[in-house]
Each structure stands twice: as C-alpha cells, then as structure tokens.
Amino acid sequence: MMNRRTFRTLKNALFLALSLVATLTGLACLAAILWTLISHGIAGMSWDLFTEMTPPPGGKGGLLNALYGSAVMTLLGILIGSPIGVLAGTYLAEYGRKSALSTAIRFINDVLLSAPSIIIGLFIYEIVVVRMGHFSAIAGALSLAVLAIPVTLRTTEDMLNLVPPGMKDASAALGAYPWRTVVSVLYPAARSGIVTGLLLAVARISGETAPLLFTALNNQFWSTKLDAPMANLPVVIFQFALSPYKDWQNLAWAGALIITASILILSISARVILAMLQAERGSGQ
Amino acid sequence: MAIIDKTHAAKQLVYERVFRAATLAAAILVLLILGGVFVSLLRGAWPALRHFGFSFVTHEVWNPVTDEFGALAPIYGTVVTSIIAMALAVPTAFGIALFLTEICPPLLKRPIGVAVELLAAVPSIIFGIWGLFVLAPVLQRNVQPWLIKHAHHVPVLGALFKGPPYGIGIFTAGLVLAIMVLPFIAATMRDVFETVPPMLKESGYGLGATRWEVIWNVVVPHSRAGVVGGIMLGLGRALGETMAVTFVIGNAHRISPSLLAPGTTISSSIANEFTEAVGDLYTSSLIALGLLLFIITFTVIAAAQTMLRRLERRAEA
C-alpha cells in the first residue's frame, strides 16, 4: 500500500501539472488563432485593400469602403457614448457615491458590460431602424455607443477614485465648487486613466459584428451618408467568409487580420499606459 | 483678503448646478437604456407572444413558410452549447488561475496574464472564422471519427456522439465557446484568488499542507463566492455569444440527440435570419427570441454580479 505521504506528494504534483497543462492549452489557443490569421491574412495583403471597394461576387477588389465605414461608426460611437460614460462615472465617483441610486446604476452598468451585444442591436433596430424605415450608419453608431458607455463609465469611476483625496480637499479649501474641482483638478489628474478607458472602449466596439447586422447592415458601394446603410469590416468579414468565392474569402481573412491586429495593438497600448500610471503612482508615494 | 465678486459666485453656482444635472442625467440614462432594452424588445415580441402564447417556448417547429414559430430548438441549442462550453472552460480556467496566482514564476506572471487577457480582446467573429476554417476540419478528420468509433459501445456517450462527422455542429460550437469564455473566467478567478490573505495560506503551509492542499482547502473555500461569480459571468457570455457560434453551429432548427449534429442557438438564429425575415410574425418571433435571451442572460449576469459584490464587500470589511 502506498505511503500516505507519497500519495499526497503525488496528488500535489498531478494537480500542479494539470494547471500547467491548462495554461499551455490557453496559450496554444491564442497562438493558433494568431497564427491562422497571419498565415491566411498575409496572402491577401496588398495596396488594393486600401484603395479598392468591396468587389461583386467573384471579382477582385479591396476593403476601402468597409474600412472607412468601420472607422466612421466606431468614431461616432465613441463620440456619442464616451461623454455619457465619463459624465455618469463622474456622478458615481463625486456626487452619488454610496447613495441607493448609485448602487443601482453601478449594478445595471456591470450587467450592461456583459450583456450580449446582439440584444443591443435588436434594441437599436426597434427604436431607430423601425422608426426611420431603413438601415443606416447612424443606427450602427448608436448601437456601438450603447456598448461603449459601460466601459468608459467603469474606468472613469475607478480612475477618479484613484486620485488622492488630498488634491480634492485642497481645491475645496480654495473655495472651488465641486464642478470646478472635477474639471480643473480631477480630470487632469485622472486623464491617462480615462484615455485608457476610451482606448478599451474603441477596442471593444470596433470588432462588434452582431449589433451592426441589423442597424448599419452593409453596403457594397462607397457611401458617406449617415442615414443610409454603410459597409463595415466585421459584417463584410461575416458575409465574405461564408461565401463560396475564393476572392471574397481571401478578403475576409485580410480584413480579419487588420481588425485583430488593430484591436490587439489598442489593448496592449491601453495596458502599457495603465502600467506606467501605476508605476508613477507607486514611486510618488 | 480677496474681494468676493457676487456675480462670479452666482455664475459658479449655476455652472455647478448644470454640471451636476448633466452627470446625473448621464447616470440615469444608463438605467433608462436597460429599461428601454426590455420595453422595446417586449413591444417587438408582442405580436409573436400573443399569437403563440406560452407554446412559443415549448414548440420545436420553426417554419417561416407556414408562419409557425417555436423556440424550443434554439433554447435547447443555447443551453447545450453553453453546458459543453462551461464543462470544458471551467476546469481549464481554474487551472490557469491557479497557475498564475500560486505556481507561476514572478517573471512570467505578467506576460502570461496579458496573453490571457488578449485572448479576451479578440473579436468574436475571429473565433467564428477560425472555428469554421481551422477547427472544424480538424475535428471532422481526426477527432469526431475517433469519438464516434469509440463511444458507440458506451450507453449514453454512444447516443451523444452518433451520426456522420459534419465538423460543424453543437459540439464544435460548444468547443469554440469554451475557448472564448476561458479568458473571462480565468481572469475573474485569478483576481479572486489574489484577494486571499497570505496569512491564511501561510497557516496552511505551517501545518505541513502541500501546495494543492492549501489551494483546495484554503484558497478555494475562501474565494468560493467569487469563483462561482466568475463562472456565472462566463456562462452569461456563452449564452449570448453570437458570431462565433453562427459560423460553426450549422443553423438547423431541430433538436438532435447527437452532439455532432448541426443545431441552432437563440443568438445565431437571430443573426442568421433577422435581415432575411419577411412578414411581421417572423420578425416578431425573432425579437421574441431576443427577449428570451435578454431575460436568461440578465438573470445569470445579475446573479454573478451579486455574488462578486458580496465578496468585494467582505474584502473591504
């Protein structure tokens, strides 16, 4: 019979080994996905991607209209969503604090943060697309804005709470109203943190596909009209990847590589800013 | 002593009120959005709910030609793919969180942590095309034939892994979902494990416990609420995930006992059919599916948040 001590040591080794295997599995998944994107995407990389429109079935072309549409809708989404998120985060951090209303808002915001994005798409479809009578870029931007709000709200509140209370007290002691303290002291002090929140929000919404399917839809042609359907990278990838045409599939892979690379670069920069911020705070104290 | 300018002070007061009102309005807008989502989905779903009544959730038939819509197949697909995803992702995420908090050399802690978080940042559509073009063929060629061959003697497994290896289907969707929710669960668990006071762990080691014994008997019980919260958060994502599933599930409105058969989920039905839906009842039925998904995920996420919050309060106290 096995010695009890040996048994415990073996069990320990077994579970530690399993946790190593789990970690390697996770890393392998990331590596496999990135490798697929690079090996398939590089083949489709060419200048045409950035100068030509999406082609008809079987033809050659690029992704210019989709890149433009994605940029416009993401930008609009951030421009509409982030002020709301920042202001609401300011309310929670400075005015509401521990009131019942703030607690409720924090809870609802966290729910929205993980709510399925397809639901947000249906919501905007119901309140914008149905009323306008057709799909439009502005509806797409609004659905992205709704997705950006919870991200910016959360980071803004967290970052404002990190500002040393002494700075706030000093401003109040000079006779400044809270709004003046927020605008002239807290926002500048928390600036890089809030910007990080914006970057994370851009990263979050620029890859979203489901909500755009029934708001912006897609457009094979160049369009700058905000009240008309607009092409966008995720929906083009969705349609082209599932098509039987080789040229379309290659474009889908190239688009997938572009979108993933941009999002990963954004997320990494956000993290670098945050790490620098923490290092600064750490050495300052 | 400065001269206090009355008009200046009055102006400041006005600014203060305006600013405060603006922040309050933005905060209340968050509540309104959630309320608006519910009300607008309910309104859109109303024609279908009135027409089919409760049988909407108990009927399997989904036939746009005869205008008959039942949500049972999508509900089944959503639940089964999520169960597969959680069964695979939870133990793996647990392992990753353990590795990162208890075993990993400090030098590697940050890079591996960031890599896991980057996996969470990859858009879901990427998981979709990867699943369809890379994972599904591998499963079809290598994994599924093996499962079919070896499972058919075993009573329950035989029925679960039966039929031709399509590559795509419920099983593949569950697998892709597992990879997608893995980083979310792992990151939450890691954060929760890190809140365990070192003193408790040291006490365990002081009693002569092995590392695994400390993890299982000290770290896990102490962070139980957070672990469950993290799992539920992952479950909320799995239930509502759309694009990744749409690519690999095969979109078939039927309930098959075999996991290898194509199926559908609530979200992939909406994504696949919404823009092609003709007729008010069809559109309304799809929105009713959305309402169902909203209610299910809201319940799961709210429960997860409640658990995580309880833990946070305890950590503060």
Image: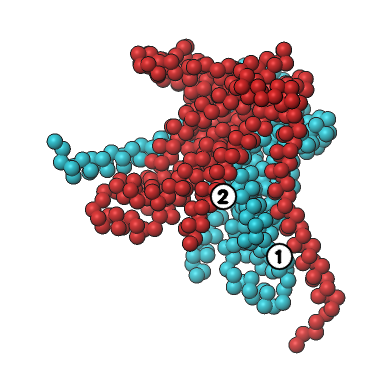
Residue assigned mark 2: A269
| Identity of the residue furthest to the right in this view | B7
Residue A204: x %, y % from top left: 62, 42
Chain letter behind tag 1: A
Q: Earlier in the sequence, mark 2 or mark 1?
A: 1
Mark identifier at residue A32: none
Chain coloured red: B
| Identity of the residue furthest to the bottom in this view | B1
Image point (48%, 57%), residue name: B314
Mark 2–mark 1 contact, CB under 8 Å?
Answer: no
Residue A184 picture quarter: bottom right
Residue B222 visible in the snapshot: yes
Q: Nearer the viewer, residue B142 or A116?
A: A116
Residue B243: x %, y % from top left: 60, 29
Mark identifier at residue A183: 1
SS of the residue under disc 2: helix
